[in-house]
Image (cartoon, rainbow, N blue to C red):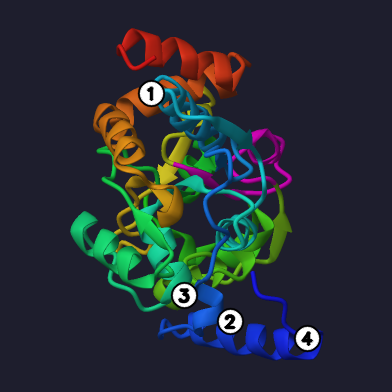
């Protein structure tokens, strides 16, 4: 990166963030990422929840099988954190979700279908990054309640919460409070106002436990989370498609995207459907197996290692 005086950097960053929030073309300086590493190593990153860590291990394993030098930097944090790491060259590759990525760059992006979400995400990302072929697998945010709560209040869809949300505490990862498809989206699309928001983990055991013990009455989990069926939780339907289409897709710095790397990741993605992903996440989240070992075993079973 070019060195820029601190005050200038701060001003440019402010402008870039403001433009990005509007979904417009961003300042060219915000488009830069680190160049390909001198030794050719690809740094694979992940968000801070089990499924994304597992996907990163799958990406890393598939690339190693092709002789690519790979390192991993896992559980970096939320999208706001790991996209900056990709932009500044700290990482080169990360598993993403088409609709949420599109809405990160343009809050008004059309994510109503897989095709629309992918196109919107591709338009939004910096020119120094690219999206590869999405997997058939899809994982969305979900609004979840216990079976007892669903029965007591006759809840089957998100709009059903309008009658009782003022009595309920909503538990979700901290970023859900501000994201366009999080608490603001539930308010805008479904008219929901909760008694309290409680910051928990991203689709993890804290959220499930808080639901089960009554600390929260509603939680944000992910649709592939094996803890949902394991604990007989109820996913409320989303008739207005607030959460949109969310295919899993590799997001990579173009400087690191050789033809060999693209081919390996596209071949891997083609094998990952929603049922497969849910089963693999279950090994990590329910059986406490090591994500790297789960990825290695599955890649071997698919002839990809």
Vertical relation: 115 (above or below) 46: below
**Camera-nearest residue between 187 and 164:** 187
State the CA–CA distance, disc 4 to disc 3. Answer: 46 Å
Vertical relation: 179 (above or below) 235: below
State the image coordinates of residue 83 (x, y, percent, origin top left).
56, 60
Q: Residues within 10 Å of mark 1 (few under 14, many from 20)?
A: some
**Which badge, 3 or 2, comes first in the chain's sequence?**
2
State the CA–CA distance, disc 4 to disc 1. Answer: 42 Å
Residue at image coords 52%, 30%: 69
State the CA–CA distance, disc 1 to disc 3. Answer: 50 Å
Q: 190 left or right of 114? A: right
CB atoms at circles 1 and 2 under 8 Å apart?
no
Q: What residue is disc 2 on?
A: 17
Label disc, if present, on residue 66 of the rendered structure: 1
Residue at image coords 65%, 39%: 73
**Which badge, 2 or 4, comes first in the chain's sequence?**
4
The magenta region covers: 201-222
Vertical relation: 134 (above or below) 175: above
Total marks in image: 4
Among the 4 quarters of the image, the one containing residue 157: bottom left
Q: What residue is disc 3 on?
A: 191
Q: 173 left or right of 279? A: right
Judged by depth in the image, the label closer to the viewer, 1 or 2, is: 1
Label 1 sits on a secondary structure element that is loop
State the CA–CA distance, disc 3 to disc 2. Answer: 28 Å
């Amino acid at each position: 990166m070019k060195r820029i005086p601190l005050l200038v950097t701060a001003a440019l960053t402010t402008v870039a963030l403001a433009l990005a929030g509007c979904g417009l073309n961003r300042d060219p300086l915000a488009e830069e990422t680190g160049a390909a590493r001198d030794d050719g190593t690809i740094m694979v990153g992940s968000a801070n929840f089990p499924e994304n860590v597992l996907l990163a291990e799958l990406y890393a394993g598939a690339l190693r099988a092709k002789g690519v030098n790979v390192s991993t930097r896992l559980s970096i944090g939320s999208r706001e954190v790991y996209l900056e790491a990709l932009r500044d060259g700290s990482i080169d590759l990360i598993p993403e979700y088409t609709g949420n990525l599109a809405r990160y760059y343009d809050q008004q992006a059309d994510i109503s279908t897989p095709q629309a979400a992918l196109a919107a995400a591709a338009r939004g990302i910096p020119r120094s990054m690219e999206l590869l072929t999405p997997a058939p697998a899809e994982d969305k945010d979900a609004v979840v309640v216990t079976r007892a709560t669903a029965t007591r209040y006759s809840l089957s869809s998100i709009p059903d919460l309008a009658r009782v949300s003022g009595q309920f505490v909503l538990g979700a990862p901290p970023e859900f409070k501000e994201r366009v498809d999080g608490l603001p989206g539930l308010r805008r699309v479904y008219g929901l106002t909760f008694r309290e928001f409680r910051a928990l983990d991203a689709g993890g055991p804290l959220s499930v436990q808080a639901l089960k013990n009554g600390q929260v009455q509603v939680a944000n989990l992910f649709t592939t989370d094996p803890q949902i069926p394991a604990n007989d939780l109820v996913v409320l339907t989303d008739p207005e498609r607030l959460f949109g289409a969310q295919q899993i897709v590799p997001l990579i710095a173009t400087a690191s995207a050789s033809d060999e790397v693209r081919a390996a990741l596209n071949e891997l993605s083609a094998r990952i459907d929603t049922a497969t992903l849910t089963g693999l996440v279950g090994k990590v989240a329910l059986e406490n197996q090591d994500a790297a070992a789960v990825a290695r075993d599955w890649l071997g079973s698919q002839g990809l290692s």
